[in-house]
Amino acid sequence: MLENILWFLAGALVYRALSYTLGINAARKAALFAYDYAIIFLDAIDKDVNRAITLKHKALWGAGLSDEEMESVKQEDSKYLVTWRTKVLAKFIVGGPSLSFSSKNYLQSINPHDRLRKLKDNLDKLEVHK
């Protein structure tokens, strides 16, 4: 009788340990999935900011600003872009949670278009296997 109770308690403990392990693994995968989509969202915002600055430069050039004024505007905009990328993109990518031990190939590319393409390919593979 005591042996049966001990086997039951051991089985309950193993069940609880397995459910915690599987729950943590599922939560980790969900967090990585959300993190990857957040990176795609930030890359899209970065493209929009670059496009807006380019349109601003074209409009100012069309308005007839002098070369000195145009140069100062471009310098201020480049400072803004560096600040934006440092504060938002770099801190998000580098300071993100360490949820896995595998290296992320899409973060190793310097070119944002390559990084985004690799990330989308990886996400498409994940969605196909679901």
Image (spheres, rainbow, N blue to C red):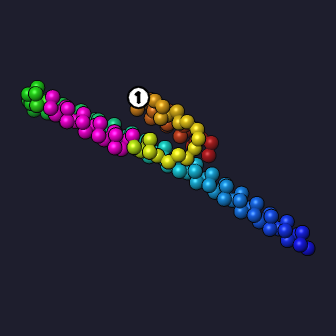
Q: Quadrant of residue 9?
A: bottom right
The residue most toward the top is 67
Q: Label 1 sits on what residue type?
A: Asn
Instruction: Report the residue marked by disc 1.
Output: 111
- Looking at the rendering, the stretch of residues picked out in magenta corresponds to 71-90
Q: Say whether residue 109 is left or right of residue 130.
A: left
Q: Residues within 10 Å of mark 1 (few under 14, many from 20)?
A: few
**From this viewpoint, is residue 121 visible?**
no
Look at the numbered disc 1 and give the secondary structure of its residue. Answer: loop
The image position of residue 73, as x and y in percent, is: 16, 34
Q: Residue at coordinates 59% horizontally, 41% vertically from top-left?
A: 101
**Quarter placement of the N terminus:** bottom right
Q: Residue at coordinates 58% horizontally, 49% vertically from top-left?
A: 29
State whether the magenta stretch is mostly helix, strand or loop: helix
Q: Residue at coordinates 80% horizontally, 63% vertically from top-left?
A: 11
**From this viewpoint, is residue 71 visible?**
yes
**Most foreground residue, 101 or 35:** 101
